Amino acid sequence: MKVIVTKNYESMSRVSAQIVLTKMLSEYRVNMSLTAGNTPKRMYEILANELKDIHTDLKAHFYNFDEIGIKNEAMGVTMQELSKSFYVPCGIDKEFIHEMTADNYQNIAKDLSNTGGIDLIVIGIGEDGHFCANMPQYTKFENDIYTIEFDENSVEYKMMKEHMGIEPTGKGVTFGPKTVLNAKQILLFANGKHKAEILKKALEGPVTSTVPASILKLHPNLTVVLDEDAASLLTR
């Protein structure tokens, strides 16, 4: 595990963008899986700006690592965010975007198997220790890609409806821990003091399903990029 501590969110975003850009500019096909949400927004802005000056055919293919369908909408939560913040601004052609849903995830798994697997996965960490959609309530470390049922009475369903203003369909899908650990490289990034406690548990505590991200430190090629606030409780 390599931990890089940067001064602030801007520098964290720039370091992370450079790691992603280097992989995107590979001479050969690479399969990448990138996170949505707030943490990567500045990273994607930097990537969009960098890619404007690069005149070469990219060989990077992109796979969303989780998805939650939205009632009466064609695209789910993750694909909407990735399209808005990354795919469109960076000019990624549709032929290089492989959308995973709860209906086609088995085909996505076969496609990844046939094309060499994930070369780089970029993920954040939730304040409860989740990564992708591997939540403390139901994470099993042996899971590959799997579906998640969203009952209307579940905490996750209510949270999305009340705080995100969306009404999810009854099923989601996510890369399980086994799929993530099979990636050739993992980039985990986080910023802010609100992430400091869970990062200490995940990176320095025991491996436990109550902190799903604690399994990530077993990966032989894990890079962690943090700002000073997020790293403030780490002792090593």
Image: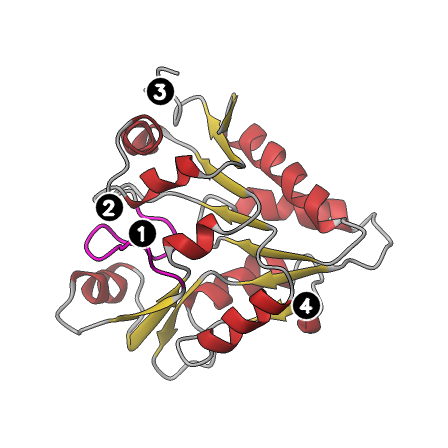
Between the residue at mark 2 and the residue at mark 3, the CA separation in whole angstroms equals 20 Å
Report the side of 109 relative to 168 (left or right): right
Determine which residue is flagged by label 1. 141
Determine which residue is flagged by label 2. 209
Q: Up-down: is 43 above or below 66?
A: above
Tag 2: amino acid: Ser
Tag 1: amino acid: Phe
Rendered residue at 83%/59% (across/down): 57
Image quadrant of residue 152?
Answer: bottom left
Rendered residue at 23%/71% (across/down): 150
User: Quick check: marks 1 and 2 in contact, CB under 8 Å?
Assistant: yes
Element type where label 2 sits in the image: loop
Q: Is the magenta stretch mostly helix, strand or loop?
A: loop
Q: Residues within 10 Å of mark 2 (few under 14, many from 20)?
A: some
Between the residue at mark 4 and the residue at mark 1, the CA separation in whole angstroms equals 29 Å
Determine which residue is flagged by label 3. 234
Q: How many labels does the image show?
A: 4
User: Quick check: marks 3 and 4 in contact, CB under 8 Å?
Assistant: no
| Residue 96 badge | 4
Tag 3: amino acid: Leu
Q: Which badge, 4 or 2, is on the more N-terminal residue?
A: 4
